[in-house]
Amino acid sequence: MDTTKNILANWTQEIPESEIRRLLKSKAKYYLAAGLPGNLPTKIFPQILRELADYYDADEKNVINEFQYGPTAGITGLRKVLAERIHQRDGAGIISGAEEWEKVMITTGSQQAIYLALDILINPGDIVVTPSPAYLGFITTVVKVGGHAVTAPTDNEGLIPEYVEDTIIKSEKEFGRKVKILYVVEDSDNPKGTTLSFKRRQQLFNIAEEHDVIVMCDAAYKEIQFEQRIPTMKTLDKDNNRVIYTSSSSKEAAPLRIGYSIMPDMLLSQAEKSKGYLDLCTPTLTQRVAEIYYDKYIDEQLPIIVKKYKERKDAAFNALIETFPDGDYTNPTGGFFIWWQPKGEKAYTFDVNKFNQEVLSPNEVLVVPGKAFYPPHGHSYDPEARKIVPLKVINGGMRIGYSFLQKDMIDIGVRKLGKLLHENLEKS
Ligand SMILES: Cc1ncc(COP(=O)(O)O)c(C=O)c1O
């Protein structure tokens, strides 16, 4: 065999290991780099497993029927329960309820739905517009399947519609091909924690219609909302031909790895075909656990979980306000993350990677550096120059995760971070 490097596919050389996966191997007492759920219905899952065990014990036929490969798009019971939940949760017009269960596709995490959608839509060089910064599991996958990522600026409310439209127009001109996908995380984005107003959702949907761009609307944090939910832009997609809507059980029921999506019919059948080649089906046993959880327990469990996340967010936010140097930061209304970046040029030049390794880590603190939320290559829209420029990375930004640690630990960790920023930012 030749050297390992020569036998590997090209993308393995192009795409590094995710910074978040790499950081998971590091230990720190004040680990603010995590996106791991720290509040789970720990008492409920064993109860559901016991219920299922009784059901399987009662009749061998139950075992034979269910301990099987399942349909690629998911088991009917779970699809019905989730169709009803999406109907109740996400605003009128997205789906009429359990009777439209065939519109819901189950995937192994919503990450798989992202992969499937990109897999069936992207040809080499196709342009995908993403927020700057954006969920790395999306942007890196864009590059992996051969797409060309162009980042559009965000503020404390997320994507800025006017700039998104200009990004589409200027990218099409610059690269001589149509923009195919616009990626949006409406509620509590990862990494910034921003939530789009309904007005912006409407504007972004109209821009996508106008320029014939498919929207990938990622609702991963839809269940973890501290305030009343804003209807999703998928409700505007009356003909179900513009928006791919993906959501997840992961943030409140992590071990199940259940993602669920609604997408235009033609894309749904292609995504199902692609999934067939990826994993044949999502494990049927976890789908059964999810079916029972969403049918019987989520309404009672979710408020308890969300309240704890809100307390953790408050602890992180208050500590940040009291101890950080001057900068731009978000105050999330849901999800797992706060974003902070220095003012002015330092937003681009302060090296948080280095700061993590040389300063934070020896002090038992870790965050995720802004650079992790950019593709290995691509372009950006520059709002001052109003043109497409080489990739512009907010190196000085950092994602502060409050989902995993207890609130007193978050308080100490974020205060330490503030103090270390004060000591190091100016001299960097
Ligand atoms: C914005 C966003 N989308 C999708 C995912 C994938 O989630 P999962 O595969 O666990 O459903 C994540 C996970 O962190 C995320 O933050």
Image (cartoon, helix red, strand yellow):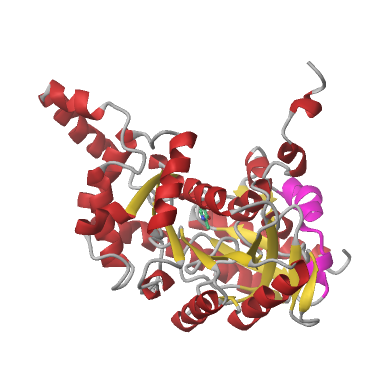
Q: Main secondary structure of the magenta part?
A: helix
Q: Could you say where residue 250 lies in the image, as x and y percent from the top left?
A: 42, 49
In this rendering, the answer to whether 69 lies above or below 126 is: above
Q: In the picture, which quadrant includes the C terminus?
A: bottom right
Q: Does the segment drawn in magenta span residue 352?
A: yes
* Residue farthest along the top direction in this orientation: 1
Q: Is residue 85 left or right of residue 394?
A: left
Q: Quadrant of residue 309?
A: bottom left
Residue at horizontal 83 percent and vertical 74 percent from the top: 345
Residue at horizontal 82 percent and vertical 64 percent from the top: 350
Q: Does the segment drawn in magenta span residue 63?
A: no
Depth check, front residue: 57 or 323: 57
Q: Could you say where residue 335 lies in the image, as x and y percent from the top left?
A: 48, 62
User: In the rendered structure, which segment of residues is drawn in magenta?
Assistant: 345-363
Q: Is residue 82 left or right of residue 394?
A: left
Q: Quadrant of residue 289?
A: top left
In this rendering, the answer to whether 289 lies above or below 195 is: above
